[in-house]
Amino acid sequence: MKAKIKIQLTHLFTVAKTFNIRDRLYAKRAQRQSRTRLARLMLALASSEAVHARRLLMYLRGKLVNSDAYLQAYLETKQAVLTVYQHLALAMRTEQKKSKAENFHQFTQVVRRQIQLLETYRNRRNRLDAALYVCQVCGFIQSAAAPLNCPVCNAIQSKFQKFE
């Protein structure tokens, strides 16, 4: 697939997923305000956007390669994403938007951990600890046991979801 087409498909997928999420949020708001017709319309629009996103993803996904090739491409993409998050954190700090700068700094920490886990998996011949715990606030992944508090966002232990 040509790079320009892939960029356009990626943009359209992002737009469809964004509208899907926003439509569902606005449907909930409309429901709370007793605007049932608007809520129904927003839910229908959300469903329609989900269909578009799913179909666009099929084009983007293309032919599935073997897992090792996918993990290598995933690792390379995460390294590029890390650089973008670092630049955004710096830009927000420069603009004195402290809370946004902190959010992008947290994203940076989470992506660093994702990269670390991918490299550990690859270097240890596909072995990781039995359980992984994902912070449902910031996305940080902890292996072996959930911490008392998230090292990135300080969320409490109960905010970690276990994956065995």
Image (cartoon, rainbow, N blue to C red):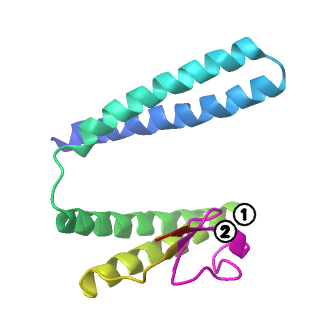
Reading the image, the residue beneath label 2 is 102
Give the position of the N terminus as an image quadrant.
top left
Look at 64% across and 82% down and name the residue there.
Answer: 147
Image mark for residue 45: none
10 Å neighbourhood of mark 2: few (<14), some, or many (≥20)?
some
Residue lying farthest to the right in this orientation: 33
- Residue 124 location in percent, x, y? 28, 87
**Magenta stretch: dominant secondary structure:** loop
Q: Is residue 84 left or right of residue 31?
A: left
- Residue 10 location in percent, x, y? 34, 41
Instruction: State yes or no: residue 152 in magenta.
Output: yes
10 Å neighbourhood of mark 1: few (<14), some, or many (≥20)?
few
Amino acid type of the residue that numbered disc 2 sits on in the rendered structure: Glu
Depth check: 65 or 77 in front? 65
Depth check: 129 or 18 in front? 129
Look at 41% across and 27% down and name the residue there.
Answer: 51
Instruction: Please tell me whether mark 2 sits on a helix, a strand or a loop.
Output: helix
Depth check: 122 or 128 in front? 128
Amino acid type of the residue that numbered disc 1 sits on in the rendered structure: Ser
Disc 1/disc 2 C-alpha distance (Å): 5 Å
